[in-house]
Image (cartoon, helix red, strand yellow):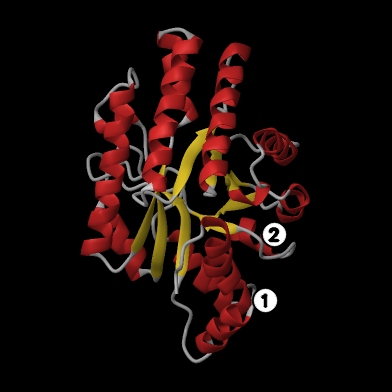
């Protein structure tokens, strides 16, 4: 551990930890609570969040062309600015093409056209990261449901391209996938093909498999249930915590709420499951190392 990190940790011992980070959630002022959800996160002790763009349909658009994705990205960036100006939470935009959108496009027109639109959209997302309008690429990846082989191959092509965009920018990429056995090895092999360092690949909605992910170098972002975090911490603190809050009033209770990550972290610290060093590692050090941001 370098001296800077040590100094930060020493300073934290003088006061309660207050730098909780939700690594993956969605905020949707159109279909959900919007900034009210961010303020709930803040009141629970949340300080930083990675604002992952939703889908074009959540914006009332169709994934038919590049313009729809560009509008989605610009909307997410504006929302992040609004969060940062109107709350005490620092948000970091994450821009990508959700695999469900690739499935939709493949079903509407040719696989080749669908891949072309997704690739071009990721290039735009990359430009916005390069211009410091966004922080990372995501969520991109493979469907967590069964699709035709041709669509699965299309999603793989898009994911490889996302890895290459991230490689060239030295930024992180958040991956959507299932949690089947071998998924970390699968992502490692794709990262190797794309020549991106695996610790820049973040497996979103991960099971508490810290050691398996460490073996391949992939970073797990673990869905923040009580049991998941207890099990993960038994294997180390090389992971992120996320709620995957979707902010949709039509789907109340789907995944986890916006207060989950800070509340659960505090609970597990107070019960002795997580040490203060674990809090620093999970919510600050890992985040700064992988995303290249400064939190404190």
Mark in the foreground, 2 or 1 = 1
Side of 136 where 82 appears, left or right: left
The structure residue drawn at horizontal position 30% and vertical position 21%, both measured from the top left corner, is 62
How packed is label 1: few (under 14 Cα within 10 Å), some, or many (20 or more)?
A: few
Image position of 115 with respect to 208: above or below? above
Q: Which residue matches tag 2?
A: 231
Q: Quadrant of the C terminus?
A: bottom left
What residue do we see at 57% from left, 68% from top? 285
Q: Nearer the viewer, residue 254 or 288?
A: 288
Where residue 136 appears, as percent x and y from the top left, is 46, 47
The single residue placed furthest to the top in the displayed view is 110
Q: Earlier in the sequence, mark 2 or mark 1?
A: 1
Quadrant in which residue 9 is drawn: bottom right
Kindly identify which residue carries mark 1. Answer: 1
Left or right relative to 195: residue 287: left
Q: Helix, strand, or loop for circle 2?
A: helix
Residue 33 drawn above or below residue 156 = below
39 w.r.t. 163: above or below: below
In the displayed structure, does residue 22 sit left or right of residue 69? Answer: right
Residue 88 visible in the shown view: yes
Residue 81, how many percent across, how many down?
Answer: 26, 55
Give the label on residue 49, or none: none
């Amino acid at each position: 551990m370098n001296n800077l990190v040590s100094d930060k940790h020493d300073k934290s011992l003088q006061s309660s930890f207050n730098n909780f980070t939700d690594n993956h959630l969605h905020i949707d002022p159109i279909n959900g609570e919007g900034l009210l959800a961010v303020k709930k996160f803040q009141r629970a002790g949340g300080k930083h969040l990675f604002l992952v763009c939703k889908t074009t349909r959540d914006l009332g658009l169709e994934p038919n062309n590049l313009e729809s994705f560009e509008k989605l990205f610009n909307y997410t960036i504006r929302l992040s600015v609004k969060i940062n100006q109107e709350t005490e939470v620092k948000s970091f935009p994450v821009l990508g093409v959700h695999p469900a959108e690739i499935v939709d496009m493949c079903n509407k027109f040719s696989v080749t056209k669908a891949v072309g639109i997704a690739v071009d959209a990721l290039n735009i997302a990359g430009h916005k990261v390069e211009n410091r309008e966004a922080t990372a690429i995501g969520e991109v990846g493979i469907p967590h449901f069964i699709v035709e082989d041709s669509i699965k191959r299309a999603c793989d092509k898009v994911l490889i391209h996302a890895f290459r965009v991230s490689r060239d920018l030295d930024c992180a990429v958040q991956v959507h996938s299932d949690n089947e056995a071998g998924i970390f090895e699968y992502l490692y092999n794709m990262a190797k093909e794309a020549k991106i360092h695996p610790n820049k690949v973040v497996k979103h909605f991960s099971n508490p498999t810290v050691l398996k992910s460490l073996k391949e170098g992939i970073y797990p972002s673990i869905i923040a249930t009580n049991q998941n975090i207890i099990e993960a911490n038994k294997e180390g603190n090389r992971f992120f915590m996320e709620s995957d809050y979707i902010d949709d009033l039509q789907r109340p209770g789907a995944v986890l709420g916006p207060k989950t990550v800070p509340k659960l972290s505090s609970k597990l610290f107070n019960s002795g499951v997580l040490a203060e060093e674990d809090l620093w590692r999970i919510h600050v050090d890992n985040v700064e190392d992988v995303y290249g941001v400064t939190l404190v």
